[in-house]
Image (cartoon, helix red, strand yellow):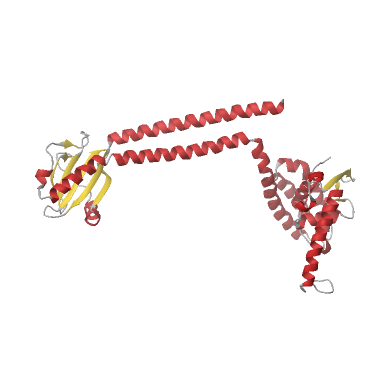
Amino acid sequence: MNSYPRNTDIQSLLPLSAAVFAILLSLAPGEKHGYAIMKDVSQEEGGALRMGPGTLYGSLDRLMERGLVEETGETDNDRRRYYRLTEFGRRALGAETTRLHRTVLAARRHGLLDPRGGA
Amino acid sequence: MKSIGDRLIFPTYRCGLALFPREFRERNAEQMLRSVSDALCDPSVRKISFCWLLFVDLIQSCVKEHSAMLPERIGKHAIVVHALGLGLILSVLGGLCMQVTQQLLRRGADQPQQQMVNLAASRLAGGETPDQVIPPGRVELGRDLQPFLIYYNDRGEPLHGTGYLDQELPSPPPGVFEYLRSHSTDAITWQPRHNLRIATVMQRVNGPQAGFLLAGRDMILVEKQESLLYHLSVVSWIIVLALLALGASLLSRNTGQQAGA
């Protein structure tokens, strides 16, 4: 069991990088394997990031080290590993989303957002 | 059914994984290959674009992972890294000390000649003639080690002197006289023939006895001192590096044994 999250202030992790935020966001609905995460982050609503396997698994390593993500310990028939958010990871994702939301509100106040939702 | 492109991409990427640090590869290679395989089977993925993504990602993530593991690797071999750093610092300091000492020796070789030309120039300026100023005696260059003095007229022809080479008063290259006309004094190493180097100080003389004074001394003694200094420095440097390597090796072994205990 990783003791890192207990001693870490979530605010000290913020802001999350775009890649980390996209990975955490992809895992928010539930556990996923690597390629599913890669597909999610490449979608418009998932961050629209072009992320290769090296970047993805390097990021997952570091996220697991920080206790934001964990392996489920289960594999499918094709031996794909599955990953899920930890409770700490979910709180970090929430904190980053709140931070971004405040930024978006500020941008809206400055008239930078299209009222229909686009930029 | 896989295309030829797919058949090439997968094995090429598998080979490319060798570029990652071993620990990272052992942990993630299988899953990375699984993801690539999934992408190649996905009909919505454009293969050329994916291939480029794989290439760029491979390079970027390799650099990132190696950089991330650098502190850990340095930590594992901290003693060796510190010993190498110390060896480098000692080598640079030793080299600088040797250079300074060598320069001091070389400058020291000019001191008697400097005094000789200064004295002779002031006497010539005081109205004495060159034959009164040049001391008696004869120094055979290449055989005798004493300093010598030669007076040249304004055209650079040797008129009086104590230093002889092959029974004649030698002359430095004409360019030296041209330089002295505008700079008044110069200190050079002059090689009138092979294996004979002279530490030379020259000075322009103005007034009724206009010309040039040259005081020189065979550099063989200084060169022997320089050679001795060089050999002592190299031997000391090798001993210091060997001791450092030995110390680092013993410390690493002890640390490894303590960690293993």
Name which quarter of the figure residue B111 lies in: top left
Report x, y in % for residue B82. 58, 36
Q: Position of residue A72 (x, y in %)?
A: 88, 45
Name the residue rendered at 11%, 38% in the picture.
B136
Examine the rendering and report whether any part of residue B193 can be seen: no
Q: Could you tell me residue A10's position as x and y percent? A: 79, 51
**Residue at (13%, 55%) from the top-left corner?**
B207
Q: Is residue A63 visible?
A: yes
Question: Residue visible at 17% across and 36% down?
Answer: B139
Q: Quadrant of the N terminus of chain B?
A: bottom right
Foreground of the two, B7 or B130: B130
Tell how many labels. Answer: 0
Place of residue B121 in the rendered image (x, y in percent of width and height, measured from the top left): 17, 48
Q: Is residue A49 left or right of residue B183?
A: right
| x 39%, y 40%: residue | B99
If the image is split into quadrants, where does the C terminus of chain B sit?
A: top right
